[in-house]
C-alpha cells in the first residue's frame, strides 16, 4: 500500500504520456500573455538605491531597472535616485548606469529606452553617517514630488 501511495504521488507529479515520454508541464503563468496582472504599471515613484556605485547595483539593480523600462513596466513618471559616497553629479551617475545596464541587461539594448531611463536618473552624494546628506536626499525627494508627481512614493 505504501508503494502505491508513493507511486501515485510520483505519478501525479511526473505523469507520462503516450510512449512513456514525460508530459510537458504548463508554462510559467506569470509569463502567460493572457494574464492581465502583468500589464498594470505602478503609479509614479522614485526608486532610491543606497550604494548605487557598488557591485550589486551595477550587476543586478541597474540592469533590472533598464529591463523593466524595456518591457514597458515602469511608470512614465519614474525616477531612479542613486545615493553613494562619491562626489558626483547626475552626469557621472548616468555614465555608470549606462555602462552597467548595457553590459548586464537581459533584454535587447534599445537606445530610445535608455534615453528615457537616463532622463530619470538623479544622484545624491553622501555618506551613510552624514545627516546633511540625508537632508539633501529628503529635499531631493520633495522636489521630485513636484517635478515628477511621485507624491512621496519612494
Image: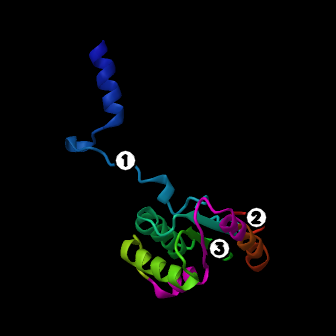
Q: Considering depth in this image, is 123 or 120 the residue closer to the camera?
A: 123
Residue plotted at (28% across, 42% down)? 17
Alpha-carbon distance for marks 3 and 2?
12 Å
Residue plotted at (31% across, 37% down)? 15
- Name the residue tied to disc 1: 25
Q: Earlier in the sequence, mark 3 or mark 2?
A: 3
Residue plotted at (72% across, 63% down)? 153
* Quadrant of image for the N terminus: top left
Instruction: Name, please, the residue furthest toward the top.
Output: 1
Where residue 78 is drawn, which disc sits there? 3
Decide if residue 1 is on the left or right side of residue 82. left
Decide if residue 60 is on the left or right side of residue 8. right
Q: Position of residue 10 (x, y in %)?
A: 31, 30
Q: Considering depth in this image, is 139 or 78 the residue closer to the camera?
A: 139
Label 2: which secondary element: loop
Q: Position of residue 2 (x, y in %)?
A: 30, 14
Alpha-carbon distance for marks 3 and 1?
37 Å
Crowd class of label 2 (few under 14; some 14 to 19; many from 20; radius 10 Å): few
Label 3: which secondary element: strand
* Quadrant of image for the C terminus: bottom right
Alpha-carbon distance for marks 1 and 2?
43 Å
Q: Nearer the viewer, mark 1 or mark 2?
A: 2
Q: Position of residue 92 (x, y in %)?
A: 51, 83
Q: Position of residue 91 (x, y in %)?
A: 54, 85
Q: Is residue 120 magenta?
A: yes
Q: Earlier in the sequence, mark 3 or mark 1?
A: 1
Where residue 152 is drawn, which disc sits there? 2
Q: Give the magenta-colored segment's residue range.
A: 110-137
Amino acid at each position: 500500500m505504501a508503494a502505491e501511495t508513493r507511486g501515485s504521488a510520483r505519478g501525479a507529479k511526473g505523469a507520462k504520456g503516450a510512449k512513456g515520454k514525460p508530459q510537458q508541464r504548463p508554462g510559467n503563468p506569470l509569463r502567460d500573455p493572457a494574464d492581465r496582472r502583468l500589464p498594470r504599471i505602478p503609479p509614479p515613484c522614485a526608486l532610491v538605491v543606497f550604494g548605487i556605485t557598488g557591485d550589486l547595483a551595477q550587476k543586478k539593480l541597474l540592469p533590472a531597472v533598464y529591463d523593466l523600462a524595456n518591457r514597458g513596466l515602469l511608470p512614465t513618471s519614474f525616477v531612479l535616485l542613486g545615493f553613494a559616497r562619491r562626489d558626483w553629479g547626475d552626469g557621472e551617475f548616468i555614465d555608470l548606469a549606462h555602462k552597467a545596464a548595457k553590459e548586464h541587461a537581459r533584454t535587447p539594448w534599445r537606445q530610445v529606452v535608455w534615453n528615457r531611463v537616463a532622463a530619470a536618473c538623479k544622484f545624491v552624494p553622501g555618506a551613510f553617517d552624514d545627516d546633511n546628506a540625508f537632508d539633501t536626499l529628503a529635499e531631493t525627494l520633495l522636489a521630485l514630488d513636484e517635478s515628477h508627481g511621485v507624491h512621496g512614493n519612494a
